[in-house]
Image (spheres, rainbow, N blue to C red):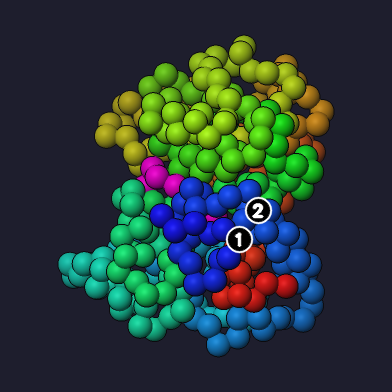
Amino acid sequence: MQQIADDFREKDILSLEQFDTKSILTVLQQATHMADIATMAKPTTLLAGKIISLLFFEPSSRTFSSFAAAAKRIGAQTIEYQGMHVSSVAKGESLSDTIKTFASYSDAIIIRHPEVGTATKAAEASDIPIINAGDGIGEHPTQALLDCYTIHNHAGKLDKLKVVCAGDMKNGRTVHSLLSALSKFADNTVYLLSPESLQLSPTDKASYTENGLTIHEIFHEKDLPKDADVWYWTRVQKERFSSDEEYEKMKHRFILNLDLLNTYGNSNLILMHPLPRVGEIATDVDADPRAVYLTEQMRNGMYVRMALLALLFGEEV
Ligand code: CP
C-alpha cells in the first residue's frame, strides 16, 4: 500500500497503515486552519474547478454530508450518489466500470461500500485519487483522523494516552482505524470493553500490538481504568450480524450512563462516539461537559476532510 510520507498529492487514502506520525500531524495542523476558514464569512476557492464524486453504497449521515460540505467550503463541486439503486450498479455494472465512469468526470472519488477491500479495488481501477469512506468491517481512515484531531485538541498530544474503547471491537471499522492510528504514537494503552463474541480479531490485535500499542481486553465495566483520557463508545454493528436474535442479545450489553460515568470516569476525560448512536449512550449524558460526540467531534469531521481534500491537490494553507 502506497505510503503517504507527508506528501498527499494525488494519493489514495485507503487505510491508516499508509500514515506515519508526521503525516497524521500534518492533517491535524491543516484541519486547524480549515476550522478558521469554515468560520469565515467569505468562502474560499482553494479547490475551485475541482469536482469530487461521492459514491456511497452504504448508509451515511456524517461522512457523506461532511465530505460534501468540506468540498463545497473550499470551492469544489460534487457529484453525489447514495445507495446501490441509483447508479448503473443496479443494472449489474461492475465496480471497475463504475469507478472508471466517475473518474472520467471528476478529480477524486470518495467511496463507502459494505465489502472490505472495495476502496482498494476502486483505487486499482482508477487514475484519480480514491478516499475510503468506510469499507465493511475494514477501515474508516478519515474517521480516525478526525478522532485524532478531537483527542489532540483536548489532550494536546497523541502519545502516552489511556483510551477506553467500548462496544463492537470485532466489526467496528472506526475502532480498527483509531487503534491503528494510536499504535503509531509512543506509549499508548487501550482498554477494549466488549462482549467476548465481539472481541477484536486475533489478526488485528497482533498487528496493533506489534506496532507498540498496549491492549487490555476487558469484559466487565468493573475493570475500567479510572484514569483514562478518552472513552470511545461505539454501537454494536447490527448490519454485520447474520441473526437478529444474536444482535438483540448484544446490542445493549454496555450502556454508558451517568451512573457508570460517575463511578469510573474522571473530570479530565472526553466522551467520544463515531455515531450513529442507537441506545448505547443514555441521552442525559449528552449535557455532560465531557461529551463531545454530538458537538465538536462531529464538526471536526468537516475540518479534517477539508484538510485532506486540500492536501490531495497540493493546496495546503
Ligand atoms: N461516523 C460515521 O461514519 O457516521 P456515518 O455512518 O453517519 O457516516
| 55 with respect to 303 (left or right) | left
Could you tell me residue 79's position as x and y percent?
Answer: 44, 77
Magenta residues, start to end:
136-143
**What label does residue 187 carry, if any?**
none
- Identity of the residue drawn at 51% across and 16% down: 219
| Quarter occupied by residue 241 | top left
Whether residue 96 is situated above or below residue 192 in the rendered picture: below
Where disc 2 sits, the SS reads helix
Residues at marks 1 and 2 touching, judged by CB atoms closer than 8 Å? yes
| 287 with respect to 282 (left or right) | right
Q: Nearer the viewer, residue 294 or 43?
A: 43
Whether residue 183 is situated above or below residue 150 in the rendered picture: above
Q: Nearer the viewer, residue 76 or 315?
A: 315
Q: What's the amino acid at mark 1?
A: Asp
**What label does residue 22 carry, if any?**
2
- Name the dominant secondary structure of the magenta segment: loop
**What label does residue 6 carry, if any?**
1
| Quarter occupied by residue 110 | bottom left
| 37 with respect to 232 (left or right) | right
**Residue found at the far bottom of this picture:** 49
**Residue found at the far left of this picture:** 92
- Identity of the residue drawn at 64% across and 18% down: 224
Could you tell me residue 105's position as x and y percent?
Answer: 39, 84
